[in-house]
Image (tube, grey):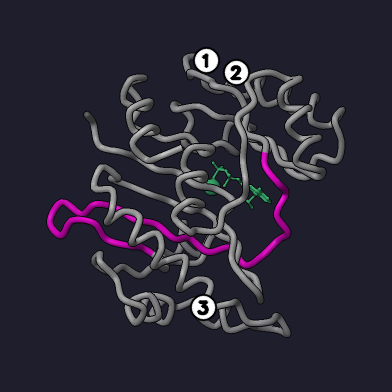
Amino acid sequence: MTFETVLAQARAEGRTLLNEVEAKELLREAGVPATAATLAKTRSEAQSQATTMGYPVVLKVVSPDIAHKSDVGGVKLNLADSDAVGTAFDEIMASSKAAEPNARIAGVSVQEMAKQGTEVIVGMTTDPQFGPVMMFGLGGIMVEVLKDVSFRLIPLEAKDADQMMAEIKGRPILDGVRGQPPADLAALRSTILKVSEFVQKHPEVRELDLNPVFAYPDGALAVDARIVISEA
Ligand code: ADP
Ligand code: MG
């Protein structure tokens, strides 16, 4: 799947939001670590994809009209077998349709269940004045409530990525608190830089969010991805 193919398809369908499966595939090709994900249109497709992928898996609603999947009951984690996948598929469809009756639903994404890590956010927004800027912060309440994030203009160099990670107030969490091992800062730096390169290469990308990226003592992995492209 090339960027141009995905772009053309989204525009043909009148979408400015790339779905999670598309976003993750493009990012993986660009060297950004992200969970593998496939699109299943039916219950039995979801089951056979999960069996091929190996359990446990995660199922998530895929819809260009649903931005926050958990809010509509559209995320089911840690599904252990084919029966659990079937039930999760039915529940996701029912709760998503109940919450957003007019939403176009393409199906569900089937993805590997990642082991828990420290949640961070890597993103890009287009500032009306400055143009594309990268954003970095800690996930969850740290970004939602405390707005503890740092920004840098694209393009970025390694030292910019390091400064972004140094500037947040929650930085001690990355260094390891209360016996937690430190996060792999080199892997986070590489993730920030690869995303920066990706958006630089594709000016059609208006917004990009990896929320969250799991930071591990060894490595990093994006488990959610969202890309917004400009109108045709
Ligand atoms: P939302 O659209 O609500 O942001 P996410 O895809 O971020 O949905 O999923 C919600 C939460 O579920 C994430 O913050 C993360 O903690 C967890 N999660 C999502 N995908 C995975 C995965 N593949 N493996 C493990 N945990 C996941
Ligand atoms: Mg998310």
Left or right, 232 with respect to 109, comes to left
Q: In which quarter of the image is residue 37?
A: top right
Q: Earlier in the sequence, mark 1 or mark 3?
A: 1
What residue type is disc 1 on? Pro
Which part of the image, by quadrant, shows the C terminus?
A: top left
Q: What stretch is highlighted in magenta?
A: 111-135
What residue type is disc 2 on? Ala
Q: Does the magenta stretch include residue 131?
A: yes
- C-alpha distance separating marks 3 and 2: 43 Å
Cβ atoms under marks 1 and 2 closer than 8 Å:
yes
Q: Earlier in the sequence, mark 3 or mark 2?
A: 2
Q: How crowded is mark 1: few (under 14 residues within 10 Å), some or many (20 or more)?
A: few
- C-alpha distance separating marks 1 and 3: 44 Å
At x 70% / y 61%, what residue is drawn? 116
Q: Residues within 10 Å of mark 2 (few under 14, many from 20)?
A: few
Q: Position of residue 140 (x, y in %)?
A: 55, 58
Disc 2 designates what residue?
98
At x 71% / y 38%, what residue is drawn? 76
At x 39% / y 59%, what residue is drawn? 195
Q: Is residue 61 magenta?
A: no
Tag 3, which secondary structure?
Answer: helix
Disc 3 designates what residue?
186
Is any atom of residue 96 visible in this view?
Answer: yes
What residue type is disc 3 on? Ala
Q: In which quarter of the image is residue 85?
A: top right
- C-alpha distance separating marks 1 and 2: 6 Å
Disc 1 designates what residue?
101
Tag 2, which secondary structure?
Answer: helix
At x 49% / y 47%, what residue is drawn? 225
Is any atom of residue 140 visible in this view?
Answer: no
Q: Where is residue 111 in the image (x, y as percent from the top left)?
A: 67, 42
CB at mark 3 closer than 8 A to ligand 1?
no
